[in-house]
Image (cartoon, rainbow, N blue to C red):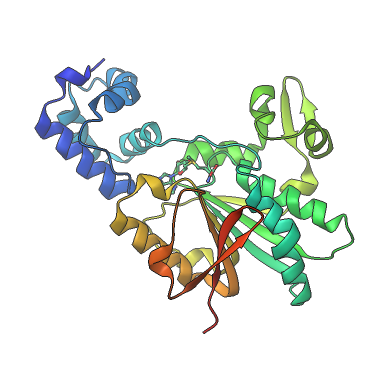
Amino acid sequence: MVSSREIIPEHYQAFRAFLEQSCGIVLGENKQYLVSSRLGQLMEREGLKDLGELVYRVQQPGGQRLRGMVIEAMTTNETQWFRDTYPFTILQETLLPEYQRRGVQQMRIWSAACSSGQEPYSLSIALEEYRARGARLEAEIVGTDISPAMITQAREARYSASTVNRGLSPERRDRYFVREGADWVVRPEIRRRTQFTVHNLLDSYSNLGRFDLIFCRNVLIYFSAESRESILTRMIQQMRPGGYLIVGASESLARHARDLEMVRSHGGVIYRLRGK
Ligand SMILES: C[S@@+](CC[C@H](N)C(=O)[O-])C[C@H]1O[C@@H](n2cnc3c(N)ncnc32)[C@H](O)[C@@H]1O
């Protein structure tokens, strides 16, 4: 195991540059301990003597597998059902009724950096509950994440008892999940409108199509101001007229005020694409 004391400054700087270039994540000046704790086992398994060798190997032809494992180890996948509550309340009480009034029948929703699927499935449950009030509105919900392991887990839609209880009421759990052994599996009527794809937010968005609603929460905080601006500018281009963008509770879009109008609702802030 590499200890943080053994990471020489030159290797640390090279690793920081590699990480930012490949997935946008900016590591602080003194996060050597984080690198050691996240990569120690992987480096031991792969027989890498130090961080310098790791940076060299990921950049060689054939380094793709190792590159994927390093990014996987360095990302934070923390998530939960109906995270922060207000985005889902706004969806049910304001956005879905608005889309219905406008005559939209099929919405497209993007859950960008969706981790293991809790956010897209929470969106689907919120829509299912709205439809139970008699609405005919439907949606295609696209979940994307850079991590193949997270996307596999999201597609499987299978969660342990402790994971399923994080943010989910027992009523919603019993209604929208089926118990299989020790796990809980999302019911087909919630899964049917979701699809999942591995996608790096630094890459092009043109293959994803355009969206009425984009959730991009708790991921921009890890990026540089430059990457954040580029991601948001390109997301705005993927929004359909009258579309909405919801970011994390601590993330601000003040710099995009020309394109996005701030809307305060149900104790939170969301952003509406300004009419062109
Ligand atoms: C903290 S989780 C947030 C999950 C969910 N959006 C939420 O708010 O609960 C951050 C996710 O961003 C993903 N991620 C990090 N860098 C990324 C990138 N460049 N492109 C796409 N996803 C990325 C990670 O794999 C991780 O699953």
Relative side of 13 to 106, left or right: left
Residue at the right extreme? 134
**Taking the image as drawn, is residue 120 in sight?**
yes
Relative side of 233 to 77, left or right: left
Residue 124: x and y in percent read 71, 51
Total numbered labels: 0
Relative to residue 144, is residue 229 depicted above or below?
below
Residue 242: x and y in percent read 60, 75
**Taking the image as drawn, is residue 59 in sight?**
no
Relative side of 171 to 5, left or right: right
Residue 249: x and y in percent read 52, 49
Query: Residue 145 versus residue 223: which sits nearer the camera?
Result: 223
Query: Residue 83 versus residue 140: which sits nearer the camera?
Result: 83
Residue beneath the point at 78% across and 34% down = 173
The image quarter containing residue 53 is top left
Relative to residue 165, is residue 188 depicted above or below?
below
Relative side of 115 to 50, left or right: right
Residue beneath the point at 76% across and 34% down = 169
For the N terminus, the image quarter is top left
Residue beneath the point at 43% across and 35% down = 76
Residue 231: x and y in percent read 39, 60
The image quarter containing residue 74 is top left
Residue beneath the point at 65% across and 39% down = 81
